[in-house]
Image (cartoon, rainbow, N blue to C red):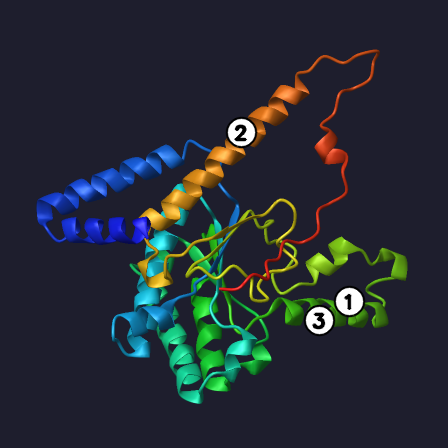
Amino acid sequence: MYSSSLNILLNTLGSFPVLSYATGFVKDFIISIMKTAPVPRHVALIMDGNRTYAKNNNLPLKDGHNAGAESLIHVLDVCYRVGINTITIYAFSIENFNRSQAEVDTIFTLLRDKLSLLVQNETSFAQLNRVKIRIIGNKSLIPQDILTDLEQIETKSNLNDTIRVLNVCFPYTSRDEITHSMKTIVEMYKNHQIESKNDINMQTLHDAMYMGPDSPPLDLLIRTSGHTRLSDFMLWQCNQDCTIEFVKTLWPDFKFVGITCILFKWMYYKTLQLEEEERISKIPTKNNKVVTNILKELPPAPPFASVSGS
């Protein structure tokens, strides 16, 4: 709740020209400090809370989703300026098809329209920040007219000088992604692209996921609105090296303060980890036996999942 209050304060100050300049200077200064620390390679976002935000503020549901889209731009701006080059967002779960048709149509249209604005011209967000937009998920479930527009958006953003990626999971669930990976591998085996069953391993499964083999490992996953569950999002990617943060702030209220606080926390603990690894690496050997970090000799931890209530 503190981050929501601070965001409101910053927005209020930003409405005055002089104070707006000062607020921008402070934000630039904070980002410049963050650039000196270790930076996540890949951040995922479960943008939860649009419907609750609309209800709490007596707004139409569409306005809640619009407010959420505005927050996404704020968060992307911070992440890309800090140096995080891959962002993955949970835009629409396959389970969301259980909602009313009116809401589903609203989300589909809103997503298409907002993504179109990102690539509209040379001064649009994606073009200025050299961001490639990728639609990740089961595209067979997308209406053809929406799919055609989304594919055009992908093409417009897929320029030679792109250095950043925005993965839009739509429609998506991890179970569907893992099923897709297994089906792909079966086809590859039948077509002799995989010679032996012994060649099928975790890396093979990973490469056949919707994300593809070039997607960097997931370092940080954030879910807003206070729910402490992953809702079938990136379960394969949330391995022992991924930090998961659940915050109570509703997504439309999650802007500069919210994302910077979480990133500062991640950077702090990552710095401690790197310093500890460096310290251990400098410990002298005894009797020609190399002293290693015993934690690295343990088997991998199981994927993280929380089943507690909201």
User: Type of residue at label 3?
Assistant: Thr
Indicate which label's residue lies in the foreground, 2 or 3. 2
Residue 272: mark in rendering: 2
- Numbered disc in front, either 3 or 1: 3
Quarter of the image where one finds residue 284? top right
Q: CA distance from mark 3 to mark 1?
A: 10 Å
Identify the element where label 3 is drawn: helix
| SS at badge 2 | helix
Q: Residues within 10 Å of mark 3 (few under 14, many from 20)?
A: few
- Position of 265 with respect to 139 (left or right) is left
Q: Which residue is mark 3?
A: 179
Check if mark 2's residue and mark 1's residue have beta carbons within 8 Å.
no
Q: Nearer the viewer, residue 157 or 281?
A: 281
Q: Is residue 216 above or below residue 175?
A: above
User: How far across and how far down the image is residue 281, in percent?
Assistant: 67, 21
What residue is rendered at 31% in x and 59% in y? 253
Check disc 1 and report the residue beneath it: 185
- The kind of residue tagged 2 is Leu
Give the foreground label among 2 and 1.
2
Q: Secondary structure at mark 1?
A: helix
Q: Amino acid at mark 1?
A: Ile
Say which label, 3 or 1, has the lower sequence index: 3
Where is residue 193 drawn, in percent x and y? 81, 64
Query: Is residue 48 placed above or below 55 in the rendered structure?
Result: above
